[in-house]
Amino acid sequence: MLATFTFIFMALLFILVKLILIVPMREVCVVERLGKFRAVMQPGLHFMIPFFDKVAYRHEIREQVLDIPSQSCISRDNIQIDVDGLVYIQVMDGAKASYGIEDYRRASVNLAQTTMRSEIGKLNLGQTFSERDSLNETIVKEIDKASDPWGIKVLRYEVRNITPSENVIHTLEKQMEAERQKRAEITLAKAEKESTINLSEGRRQEAINLSEGDKQRQINEAHGRAKEIEILAHATATGIDLIASAASKPGGDKAIKSRLLEQFIQQTGNILKTADVSVLPAEMAKLEGFFEGMDKVTQTVQGVKS
């Protein structure tokens, strides 16, 4: 009796388990009836016909991240690089994910690898580093377009590592060193150029200052000479006026004659002292004619004054 009751209980429990389907929030279930697709069960409680309905596939509907193994790629400038990445996918249609592809995860990884090789072959080495965002967007578009029949959505793709070969790295290091040296030489050349310009500008300003100073000196000297001539002319005119005034007074003409005679004798003595050849008057009578000439000059001066 107990064995029969136990058998009946186990049979009812088995039927109950087959009758009720509880789908978790993170999954969808693909149910087949007699081997034929029936429906995609969303999260929640569902009833099934025992022995007729069964859960054929269970799919994760949360976002999934798939690791893309490192692979060798050739860039447009024929440089070999190793590239790996991550692809993020999500199941959008459980039926297509079950019947449209055998294994959508493995297919997504292989498709990401081939697409990545194709896109990197369109870029040179420098662009693979500087244009990662555009590279990621292009790979996402290509994979998403090809994976649409599989019922999955490619959300994003990220290139994780781009590793050139050792020879390429060594070459790049040499190129970077040469570029740094070039920049240093350009900087030094610019500094030397600016220094030369500053020195020439300084010499130019110095020459201008010297020229202005010499010009001002010449102007000052010219003003001084003009002033000197003016003073001498004024003094000469004053002296002539004084001589003429003195000559008009009684005995003035004799004083003038005496003064002229004194100056003549003095100048003649100076000439005799400094001359290498003895200088003597040819005729003594000429002295008398000289004095008579002086007398006439005195009378002329007195007539002009009066």
Image (cartoon, grey):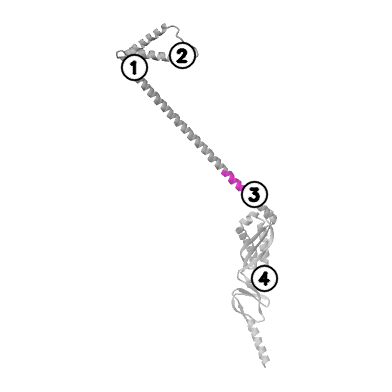
How far is the residue under mark 1 from the one under mark 4? 145 Å
Q: Which mark is residue 272?
A: 2
Residue sitting at 34 percent across and 17 percent down? 243
Q: Secondary structure at mark 2?
A: helix
Q: Tell me the magenta residue range.
A: 179-191
Question: x, y (%) of residue 45?
Answer: 59, 79
Q: Quadrant of residue 61?
A: bottom right
Type of amino acid under label 1: Ile
Q: Which of marks 4 and 1 precedes in the sequence?
A: 4
Mark 2 or mark 4, earlier in chain = 4
**How far apart are the two marked residues, 4 and 3, measured between alpha carbons?**
58 Å
Q: Are marks 2 and 4 in contact (CB under 8 Å)?
A: no
- Closer to us: mark 1 or mark 4? 1
Q: Amino acid at mark 2?
A: Leu
Which residue lies under the disc numbered 1?
Answer: 243
Q: Amino acid at mark 3?
A: Ala
Element under disc 4: helix
